[in-house]
Amino acid sequence: MSGPASPILPLGDDDLHAYIDRRLTPERRAEVERWLAGDPDAAARATFYARLNSDLHRTFDQVLAEPVPASLLPTPVHRRRVFDRRGPTLRHFAVAASWLIAGIVAGWSTHDLLVPPKTIERVVEVPGPAPTLTLQAAAAHAVYTPEVRHPVEVRADEAHLVRWLSNRMGKPIKAPVLDDSGWRLMGGRLLPVAEPDAAGPVACQFMYEHADGRRVTLYMKSVDGEPSAFRYSEEREGMGVLYWMDAKLGYALTGKLPKDDLKALARKVYDQFNS
């Protein structure tokens, strides 16, 4: 007499990730394929996850293959105590960035399309560069916002900040003024982008600070795409990324703010770039 049949577990996003990574048993894989054939929404999510996997591998595989710098290797105990007094290390920031990247993947299913400004005539439902854009913006935010002494490369009070970034980006760049919303521009920096067709710095970041110590960053990256409406990705522990595109640049505003506050700031930024 045979034993009771194994229960059929409900299908979900964990199965989609395992399906894309080829980690399912043949039986479970067949169940997922039947599910995808009859559920367009699940099939769209699977397509997005597969593309995101490809973007992650293309962007970060070369970094993973690099040897670990000697400065990040374990140090002897008698040196570690002295070193730890200096505050967070690059390894701490790298861990923070990796958690944010993981949060973006998990949080994508909660993204929503916001009402586009009237000046945007065409809305692209799923702009191609957007997933990579948000990953890079969130990683840069995680690495540089904890910095105390060097959060920016060029300070806001240095007159050449905008001119320098515009020259290096190869297009006019503005530093939006958000003082009336309580956010002071701290400065900006150039950022490299590890992509096969990237030649030099093709991204930059402005950082803003509130009187209470919170920080938001505006990430801008050269893109070839159609204008898009605002999109929002909610991350773990209140972190959010709100992004949009015009014909030449992708923008991502990142911060640990309520969604409505991030939306209000994004609209101010958008209006100043399109005034």
Image: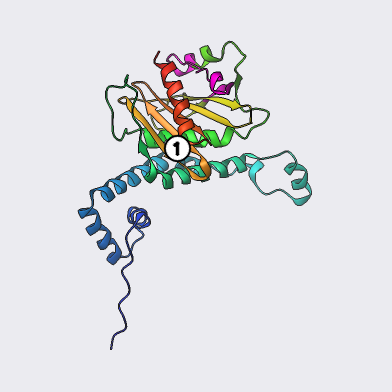
Is 22 situated left or right of 214 in this image?
left
Which residue is denoted by mark 1 in the rendering? 135
Residue at point 49%, 32% (across, down) = 254
**What residue type is disc 1 on?**
Leu
Location of residue 20 in the rendering, given as x and y in whole percent from the top left corner: 33, 52
Q: How is the image coloured?
A: rainbow
User: In terms of depth relative to the viewer, which is nearer, 72 or 67?
Assistant: 72
- Does the stretch in magenta take in 218? no
Q: Position of residue 164 (x, y in %)?
A: 53, 14
* Residue 220 can be seen in this image: no
Quadrant of the image containing the N terminus: bottom left
Q: Please give left or right for residue 219 compared with residue 183 in the image.
A: left
Query: Quick check: 188 above or below 10?
Result: above
Q: Residue furthest bottom?
A: 1
Q: Would you identify the image quadrant in which residue 171 lies?
A: top left
Nearest the viewer among 21 and 107 is 107
Q: What segment carries the magenta color?
A: 166-190
Which residue corresponds to the image point at 58% horizontal and 32% vertical from the top-left? 144
Relative height, residue 151 to residue 43 (above, below): above
Q: Is residue 261 visible?
A: yes
What residue appears at the point 77 percent right and 47 percent down from the top-left corner?
81
| Percent x, y of residue 25 | 32, 65
**Residue 183 lies in the magenta stretch:** yes
204 w.r.t. 89: above or below: above
Identify which residue is drawn at 70% across, 39% down: 87
Q: Give percent across and percent down for residue 56.
A: 42, 42
| Front one among 132 and 193 | 132
- Label 1 crowd (10 A; few <14 / some 14-19 / many >=20): many
Q: Residue furthest left?
A: 38
Q: Quick one: SS at disc 1?
A: helix
